[in-house]
Structures are given as structure tokens and as C-alpha cells.
């Protein structure tokens, strides 16, 4: 499902760690989330994704499945999957899909 939102990224690990990444959310599904960022994580890296809905900040533990540079720009398409999420975190996904379902992207 296509959505438009902003998210904060914290990449984990010894290599390429970053606690101040920002991304634009492009789409979300039951298997993962697609974003665009100028601060790409590495494929396979664990990422803590923070997304606010209303007044609630949700923290999701994800894994990078795809990183592709957009042409010759400094931006990258990044795919994260939900495989490291807890059932409680995945309840957040149900909330997102319920809220945005039926609302067209402007």
C-alpha cells in the first residue's frame, strides 16, 4: 500500500552504525516497508525504525533487504522487512494499514 510518511532510522552493528537517519516512507505491506533516504544502511543490517502515528511513537526492529541508489543521486531506495519484529510491534502494522486503507495518496 502506498503511503507518505517520515521515519527515523537507527542502524545497528559495528559497521556503518547511525542513530540519526531520516527516511521518507513510500509504501508498506505485510512483509515490509519501502523508503527513500540519503543515509542508507547496508543490506542485512538491523535497523530500528521509529514512526509516529498521531501522538504515539512506534519502534520497530527491522532488517534491511534492499538498498539501491537512485540513478546518480545521493538518495537510495531501501527495503526493510518485519522479520525481527515482535507480535506487539506487528500490531502497529495492523493499525497503520487500517488507518490508511481507503485514503488515496494526494
Image (cartoon, grey):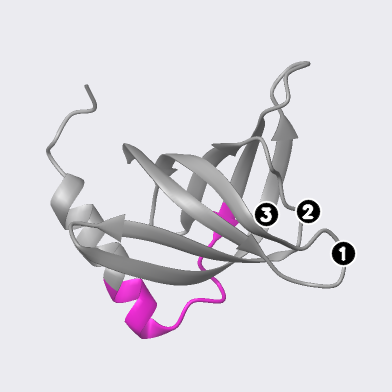
Pick the quarter of the image with the N terminus. Answer: top left
C-alpha span from label 1 to label 3: 17 Å
Q: Residue pushed farthest front? A: 20
Secondary structure found at label 1: loop
Secondary structure found at label 3: strand
Q: Residue at x 77, y 54 (%)?
A: 43
N-term mark: 1 or 3? 1
What residue does disc 3 label?
A: 65
Mark 1 Cα shell of 10 Å, populated few (<14), some (14-19), many (≥20): few
Mark 3 Cα shell of 10 Å, populated few (<14), some (14-19), many (≥20): some
Viewer-side label of 1, 3:
1
Q: Disc 2, disc 1: CB below 8 Å?
A: yes
Would residue 102 appear left or right of 18 to someone viewing this image? Answer: left
Secondary structure found at label 2: loop
Q: Which mark is residue 84?
A: none
Mark 2 Cα shell of 10 Å, populated few (<14), some (14-19), many (≥20): some
Q: Quadrant of residue 91?
A: bottom left
Q: Quadrant of residue 84?
A: bottom right
Would residue 81 appear left or right of 67 to someone viewing this image? Answer: left
> Over which residues does the magenta segment extend?
80-91
Estimate the x, y position of residue 105 in percent, counting from the top left. 24, 27
N-term mark: 3 or 2? 2
Would residue 105 appear left or right of 33 to someone viewing this image? Answer: left
N-term mark: 2 or 1? 1
Q: Residue pushed farthest right? A: 15
What residue does disc 1 label?
A: 15
What residue does disc 2 label?
A: 42
Pick the quarter of the image with the C terminus. Answer: top left
Amino acid at each position: 500500500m502506498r503511503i507518505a510518511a517520515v521515519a527515523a532510522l537507527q542502524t545497528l552493528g559495528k559497521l556503518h552504525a547511525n542513530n540519526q537517519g531520516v527516511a521518507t516512507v513510500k509504501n508498506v505491506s505485510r512483509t515490509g516497508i519501502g523508503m527513500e533516504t540519503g543515509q542508507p544502511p547496508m543490506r542485512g543490517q538491523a535497523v530500528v525504525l521509529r514512526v509516529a502515528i498521531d501522538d504515539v511513537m512506534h519502534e520497530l526492529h527491522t532488517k534491511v533487504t534492499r538498498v539501491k541508489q537512485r540513478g546518480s543521486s545521493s538518495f537510495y531506495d531501501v527495503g526493510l522487512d518485519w522479520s525481527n519484529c515482535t507480535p506487539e510491534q506487528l500490531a502497529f502494522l495492523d493499525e497503520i494499514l487500517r488507518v490508511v486503507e481507503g485514503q488515496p495518496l494526494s
